[in-house]
Image (cartoon, rainbow, N blue to C red):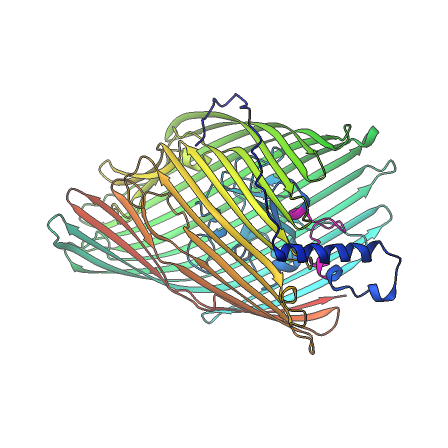
Amino acid sequence: MFSVPSHFRLALIPLSVLLAYGSTAHAQQAQEEADKTKQKQTAPAKPAATPAAPTGAVQKVQISGAKGYDERRQDTASKIVVTQEDIVRYGDTNIGDVLKRLPGVTIGGVQGRGGAIRMRGLGAGYTQIMLNGEPSPPGFSLDSLAPDNIERIEVIRAATAELSTQSIAGAINIVLKKAIVTAQRELKFGFSEENGKPGVNASLQLSDKVGKMSYSVSGNVNHGEFGRPDSSTEVFTDNKGQVTLSRKSNTESEGKFQSIGISPRINWVLDNGDMLTSQSFVNANRFTNRNQQTTDTLIGEKPLFLDEYSNNRSDSTSIRTNLTYVRKLADSAKLDVRFGANYNQREGDNNSNAKGVSQTLVRTYSSENTDNGFTYGGKYTAPFVEDHALAAGWDGGYSKRSDSNTRRDVITGTGPITAFNADEEYSANVNRLALFVQDEWNYTKNLSIYAGVRWEGIDTSSKGNTYAEIKNRSSVLSPILQTLYKIPGSKNDQVRLGITRTYKAPDTSRLVPRRFLSTNNSATSPDNMGNPNLKPELAWGLDAGFEHYLTDGGILSVNFFLRRIEDFTRTSIVNDGRWVAMPTNDGLATTRGVEFDAKFPLRSLMEDAPAIDFRANLAFNSSTVNSVPGPNNRLDSQTPVSANFGVDYKLDDVPLTLGGNLSFQNAGPVRISVNQSSYGIPKRVLDVYALWKFDNKSNVRVALGNALHQDNFSSSTYTDASGSLVRTNTSKTNMALRVNFEHKF
């Protein structure tokens, strides 16, 4: 559908003709209500106008922090903004549980255990995760952030020049809490239970203003335990249809995790009106677990190792600080300059004991890695021309990763396995620089146009004691055009259109040709290693949407997207004496989809209805990989269908609010390559909560997470001329009970 120019040629992008819209009777009624509301707002103050229902309802979606401004509705760039109230509604202790309820966002992996964050159903890496508008640093984990420390979450559907264009599927920007004008103090304490394992968490937030300085400090601690039983099978069927191998394994995993974090922020307003802001956070985490796996062979040859016992420990520390200076210039121009530094350190060890028919392997493995770096950037805003918001800026960073690993094997008995001892060290440096210019033009009262271009270059170098130095350089020129058209004759309806150029650079870890060995190597349990020859994936994208806003704060919207991805990356499996999985660039992929989103109070349909708010979203995604034969030749790990349905009911007679959310993610079969395929079952997750307010300062929140506790099932298949090997995995999930007490003082 797109003709693709060279990386350094800015194509001319035509402005598409916007669709005409015929107003329905319902839209006309909404128009009349909006006109009445406007008349009330402009008329002299009267006592009867104070309790106007439409005005109170609209205030529910004033999510930008600036009174009267709705980012989702008024910004030309398409985005969804999730408020702090929505973030803490279910008492979640990690960001993944919050994100899974958002329109078009899904979480990979087993329910309740976290996983890769995805937009548009695309796998990990296609979605850009940002922190305060900057790409999250290497080694940083969202699990280290407590939901209480977040001010809002922005779901950005189409890329903008100011933010990174490494966002083929889109971007999720997590904005930490800012200092406020009035003093606030809030204490939260919570208890949780999952499968008989307890957990506790607590957070404290302090905010105040002293003269021209305001500050906010938040801290949190978290402790939890878990028990997770899993099972798997491995069955080989030869080319004659005869089952020649059948094995079953059971795994018991128990563990603990602890975390502590603090996030201070300080704002200084200088005498000339300039502002200096410092924001930092420090997090420390520890994770320990114990695994026991036993394997029974029902048919065929026994594996090299029948039983395996392991103990794992991982300690990590993250420190990040940012300094921002905002300088006001003449003629309402403004200069924003920022600098940040980050430090991420992780160390861990694994001790395992594997028992086979004739041999026993005792392996100790220890690792230590650090990710250090800094970021810098700035933006010059020049509103010199009427109805234009022109901005230009730069964005860059440097990071250095150092990794050391030690492995020692002790083997007893006789057999095919030999000891493999290794001392590995490697380092990787990443330099990133981007330049951008953008303009938002209010062409008419009904039409606004956003146009921008961003150039981004990345230099990566890596070297180690087991391989020679590897260097990679890539750059992408990304033109972007977005439009917002408010349909004449209707104050409630608008359409959007966007054309973007985005890309996905390979992770540093996927460029390093280090090999990670599996214990029982097979086509469905291979070794893993990186590929130094990986190239970036480049994509042209088209986004279009229609939005209808209700006068009481509700919204109905539909959004379409299309992405054409060149040099897309898939994981291929080869046999060089052992089975090994490696990422490779493999041709062209096309993905497309449609998203429906609805949010409205029941009173918008029934005047005397209870105070019930509805939220629902539904997304359909599909893709085609040209180099893979069908059927089901879609992108690996893509979610074909996802949906959420949520209800909040605020009782009139008692200070109680009840709510719940049911989420659904489909999976199904995927043809990964000529030889590889996978399958996953649909996932259903139900979360419910109850909030009791004692007064304006104290409340208690009770929530049940993953109330359906559905088992998770997946399989992978490798087929060649000799037959087919199928590996299945079944994971038990558990319901989690959370009780939180919240008090402001």
Residue 476 included in the magenta stretch of the image = no
469 to 73, vertically: above or below: above
Q: Is residue 738 left or right of residue 490?
A: left
Q: Quadrant of residue 300?
A: bottom left
* Residue found at x 15% / y 42%: 721
Residue in the foreground of this view, choosing between 610 and 465? 610
* Residue found at x 22% / y 50%: 725
The outermost residue toward the bottom is 653
Q: Quadrant of the C terminus?
A: bottom right
Q: Is residue 616 left or right of residue 308?
A: right
Provide residue 551's location: percent of width, then percent of height.
Answer: 69, 57
741 to 92, vertically: above or below: below
Residue 386 visible here: yes
Q: Is residue 259 left or right of residue 516?
A: right
Residue 70 included in the magenta stretch of the image = yes
* Residue found at x 64% / y 48%: 72
Residue in the foreground of this view, choosing between 532 and 44? 44
Residue in the foreground of this view, choosing between 583 and 333? 333
Number of numbered discs on residues: 0
Residue 171 visible here: no
Bounds of the magenta span?
A: 57-73
Q: Is residue 412 left or right of residue 570?
A: left
Provide residue 626's location: percent of width, then percent of height.
Answer: 33, 35
Residue in the foreground of this view, choosing between 361 and 330? 330
Provide residue 365's location: percent of width, then percent of height.
Answer: 38, 47
